[in-house]
Image (cartoon, grey):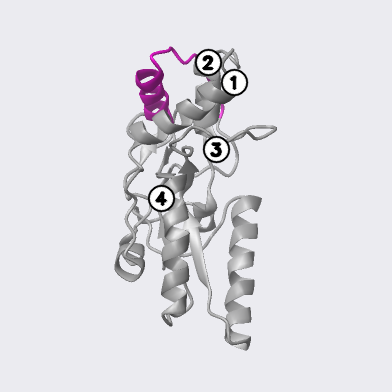
Amino acid sequence: MSPRSTAAVYGTPTAVPIPEEHAKVPVNPYGHTKWMIEQVLAEYARAYPLQVAALRYFNAAGADPSGDLGEDHHPESHLVPLVLDAAMGRREAIQVFGDDYPTRDGTCVRDYVHVSDLASAHLRALEYLRAGGQSRAFNLGTGVGQSVLEVIRAAEAVTGRAVPVQRAARRDGDSAELVANVDAARRELGWVAERSSLETILADAWRFHAKRFAK
């Protein structure tokens, strides 16, 4: 599995961590549609008295710490719940799409950010706009990347269970490394990802998984 996010607007980056000013060259339809919407919003803001904060999530993950709210998509496509499914025995194995990328272990690297931190960023962005902030985009991440295999190993540590892995060929449109430069969000919004350690993300997601799916 190789995860995707709104950071797909950048395509294959030439600088990592990626600043908001980086060229937008999406390499898959997901990234193209995200970038199209940002451009439409920017044009609208120029034509009408409306300011816009475009929040570029890197990889949203985790669950509410209570374990009552979390991810349950049909079909599921996100790495963290798929890994936890494999740990729980709800799927035979987790597929790793590509292990020959130019990264530290050959698998894709992504910047995972907790959904609770993203909720906080939305409130900070609204406060920024109410205070007269100008239209702009903000990267939301941690500035630190984790590989697919690192997520799998961390999930094994958090759950105490083995996660079977199946190797597969690369998918079209997956970039090797997407990690956020989050300086603008820190400076303009006063926002920092406080709950986004990989261990916390996985522990919260596992709590939800156990409540919802354990038999």
Q: Amino acid at mark 2?
A: Met
Alpha-carbon distance for marks 3 and 2? 18 Å
In the rendered structure, are the residues bearing label 2 and label 4 in contact, judged by CB atoms less than 8 Å apart?
no
Q: Inspect the image, locate mark 3, and give the three-letter code of the amino acid beneath it.
A: Leu
> Contact (CB < 8 A) between labels 1 and 2?
yes
| In the depicted structure, whether residue 171 falls above or below residue 19 | above
Query: CA–CA distance between discs 3 and 4?
Result: 15 Å
Precedes in sequence: disc 1 or disc 2: 2
Tag 1: Cα neighbours inside 10 Å, few (<14), some, or many (≥20)? Answer: few
Residue found at x 55% / y 27%: 82
Q: Pointers 4 and 1 in contact (CB under 8 A)?
A: no
Magenta segment boundaries in residue numbering: 148-169
CA gap, disc 3 to disc 1? Answer: 13 Å
Give the alpha-carbon distance from disc 1 to disc 2, as whole Å: 9 Å
Q: What number is the disc on residue 88? A: 2
- Which label number is shown at residue 213? 1
Figure check: 29 above or below 69: below
Label 4 sits on a secondary structure element that is helix
Tell which circle, 2 or 4, labels the residue nearer the N-terminal end: 2
Q: Give the camera-side residue of 23 and 207.
A: 207
Q: Which mark is residue 101?
A: none
The answer to whether residue 186 is left or right of residue 111 is left
Q: Which residue is labeled 3 in the image?
A: 69
User: Residue 89, located in which quarter of the rendered image?
Assistant: top right
Which SS class for mark 3? Answer: loop
Q: Which residue is mark 4?
A: 117
**Residue at horizontal 56%, vertical 35%?**
78
Queried whether the magenta region covers residue 21, the answer comes back as no
Q: Secondary structure at mark 1?
A: helix
Task: Measure the alpha-carbon separation of dots 2 and 4.
Answer: 26 Å
Q: Residues within 10 Å of mark 4 (few under 14, many from 20)?
A: many
